[in-house]
Amino acid sequence: MDALRIWKTSSDTPRLLLTSVEAALQRVPPMGVITDSRMELAVGEPFDREAFSSFTQRTGYVEEGVADDPGELVVREGGVIDIYPGGAPGPMRIVLSEDDKVKELRGFDRVSQRTESYLERVTIGPASEAIPSDGVMDELASKQETMERVLLRLYQDMPSVFNLLGDAKVLLAPDADERVGRYLEIIGDAYQSRQSFGETETSASRSIYLDREEWGRCVGKSANVLALAAGELSVAPADGDPRRALAKFARESMAEGRTVVVAGRSNGSSTLFRRLAKAAGTEARTVDRWEQVLEAKPGSLLKLSCDLNEGFIDPERNIVVLTAAGGIRTKGSQNRLLTEPELQIGDVVVHEDHGVGVLKDLESITVEDAARDAARLEYRDNGSVLVPMEDFGKLWRYGSEPEAVTLDRLHTDAWAKKREKMAADIQSTARHLLKLAKQRLDAQAQTFVPPRAAFSAFIRRFPFTETQDQAEAVEAVLSDLASGRPMNRLVCGDVGFGKTEIALRAAAAVALSGGQVVLIAPTTVLARQHFTTFRRRFAETGVEVGMLSHLLKSSEAKEVKTALAEGRMGVVVGTQALLAKDVQFANLSLLIVDEEHRFGVKEKRAMTKLAPTLHTLIMSATPIPQTLQSAMMGIQEVSLLTTAPARRRPIRTSLADFDQASMRTGLMREYRRGGQSFVVVPRIEDIEEVEAILRKIVPELSVKVAHGKMRAAEIDEVIVGFAEGDGDILLATSIIENGLDVPRANTMFVWHADRFGLAQLHQLRGRVGRGAAQGVATLLTEAGAELAEETRLRLSTLVEHDRLGAGLAISLRDLDLRGGGDIAGEDQAGHMKVIGTGLYQQLLAAAVAKLRKQPVVSQERPILNLGNVGTIPTDYVSDPAVRLNLYGRLLRASKLREINDLEEEFEDRFGEPPQDVLLLLRTTRLQVVAARLGITKLEAGPKALAMTLTLKTPSRAITALTKKGKGVRREDRLIFEQAYQDSDEQIRFFEKIMSGVSGAAKGSADRTI
């Protein structure tokens, strides 16, 4: 809608409107509604709060806690408003001055919530096509109607897109006419389905869609078919620090004679341009037109004022275009994806002194005439306690839902006894982990460095451009194989993100160097698919690839086993059949496990006994909580594949009651566009009932059936046949969840979805949308049935995480719901029932570090008795959960650089920090520096100031502090006879004498406060 408003706005520049056939077939609201449904904002102009509120309510915006999806709005106290305008490329932040004028307009990243660009003027369009007039809004809200009916009731006259385009030339994609016919059939079928199943529809005389005749009149004979050629974007890789990497890339490009152009209108692009000019040490200039770029001398650095989302390289003209918003990710950014989720109000938490409780709220209390935040924790038998801000570092997520946890009681010694018992268990686990680590360090594994020519030829057969994540994972795997120690690496990546290519290259590195490789998959279907892929890639390499499963004839299986024992076969792919005692290897060196969560403890133990020292590579989209937790703690190496493949779209996931008409519409839509569908049931007993329903509602479609009671060969035949195009619908149990690649399958219905696990559901929906078409998964529940709260949360997790790469987020949520289990043992489900996941990880990591005689970062912060030490006011950050997590990040910061980054984030997300926040940042910096110096307390009295020292305080630091502050040492304290009544002066005194002294502490990196 907003695109049409922009189109109709008068302009001297040429205009181009890009749209899809589906969008062009749908009518739009009257032009008057489109042009009037907007609000303009400009820096320096007054901001009408009432008009803004009325506009957002009328045009479909919804208030949320965070604006990270189109149509969402966050109004914060203190003059900061976040909004994600409908039709905009991203969200924006409105910063208001005290006199209610627009101070700044910023575009920000939807994930990090950090500013990416600055704007002078914006026009906000509607978030909905249904724009009610006065008095109609309440009436519409009271009725549950489809959007089609709402639009027809609102607008008597709905023009087509072509009516609004005027005499513009129309260009059509080559397959436009075919897609129009297919889409019109889907629309007609949907109408017919509603009528067939007894639902009344709006009169057929009015429709929001064009029919075939209208489409022909609108497009006319003037439309030309556009010849489209796909172009590939080449992006420079990043390494190390993003700023240095970008500067280095720009310098090298200019040295090679390329013209480097920084494009953009924001302050960020100007900053980038200045930084590159300074780093390159070359003359830089600003240009107004692309023609000037083409005429520039090779090796020039230019600034072009134009709007681009991403940069690109034009090898033909030798031009590199960079944007401030393009960003470069560091290798370390992967590790941040494994950090624990933030606390939310209502979470189960563990307080180190009080035990397991529920975080109920964040309250404001007054201490010595100063406002402070305190967390209200609720315990068993209605007990509660307030935790002051300075103790927030003692709060940890338990990692479960409140209903599934037994809370502790206050004022008893039960928690202390639990802690004491767990401390012994943690020490035991730490010793076990150290023993394992020592065994790995001491263990000698065969070194594999693949022959360069053969390995390069193998890589060239990969038909796609590898992502940065894949490149990093391959580099890590090759480094592990060449280290001389056994590799133990988890490759975690969503369905279709390229895990198999990592496995192929690991296998090639070993097999081409004379070692043997075994790949174990949980099902025969997945094993067969891997076998086909590996055999094709290893063709003409001289490496024999075989397969072993219980589907093979005994003579075939015997031949494979003989080839493995004699060393003639370099790679074998199979199922658990590979773990049989009669399978022997001549030189087994690498074990690859696909979808580890499908294997039991018995199988995993058998895998470890395949060879004395074995390189191991685990592949999973949703690793089990135990494995994920090991990776989070750094016990196991991990490579994350988080970059979506080109042209891959996220699977749109929805939760709905079963409805025959909707199901028919979805299945027929897929059939009309030439695709296939899955219908998945939780039990074999459900097959007959669902098959009868399908025969009734879609009798024209071919239904194939697969389930676990069928013979293995029969299952294989049905599933592989379906993948090759035999059948329109595959009705199956969860046996199809792993690895099945059906490029034409784009629709899935999951029957009784509440009976599946999280990882299962995510794997199942990964079976659709693997081609270029949009995949759709509908989780069906029984009509009218009331879902249990835990079930609703589990299914909601799937719907919320329907973006690409959601597998890791789902595993982290599964770690919350199920717990991490015993890392050193075999229990991979169940909660850390005593102290919770977060605290357990922290204590175990500390115990391991202590046993290794490594310095342990203390969570205890020095005590500050300096009056007001600052806070985060509610009128600055209104959301209590956001406030609590900001406190937590401050309390866990161990470097001044981290606090400086947080200060930037405060200003970026919430506006200019008030004095209370600036004071909190200052006192936190003091605590960080004091902790490094072994100082446990800073205090001020009416006649003097003092700091409490410990044995960890370096003697050089004591000497420097005594000299700078003119202090006197009395036992474990330094006394400074300075009378400061104002807390700000007291803080300034400590800042002055400690600045620069922190460098005297061992390992210090920050020298000034």
Image: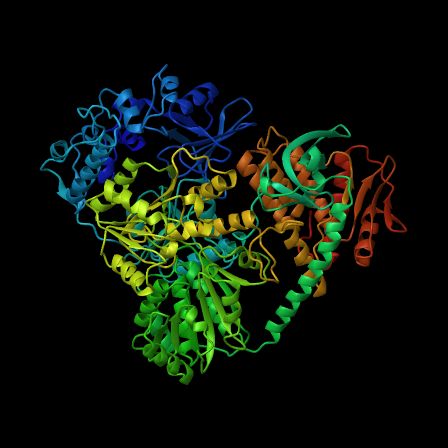
Classify residue 368 as left or right of residue 321: right
Q: Is residue 496 visible?
A: no
Residue 832, percent across and down? 62, 51
Residue 580 versus residue 490 in the image, above or below: below
Residue 46, percent across and down? 47, 22
Q: Is residue 696 visible?
A: yes
State the residue lying farthest toward the left. Answer: 221
Residues 877 and 383: in front is 383
Residues 197 and 955: in front is 197
Classify residue 206 as left or right of residue 40: left
Residue 985, percent across and down? 77, 36
State the residue lying farthest toward the right. Answer: 970
State the residue lying farthest toward the top. Answer: 135
According to the image, what is the colour scheme of the structure? rainbow
Task: Give the position of the N terminus as an image quadrant.
Answer: top left
| Quadrant hosting residue 742 | bottom left
State the residue lying farthest toward the bottom. Answer: 566
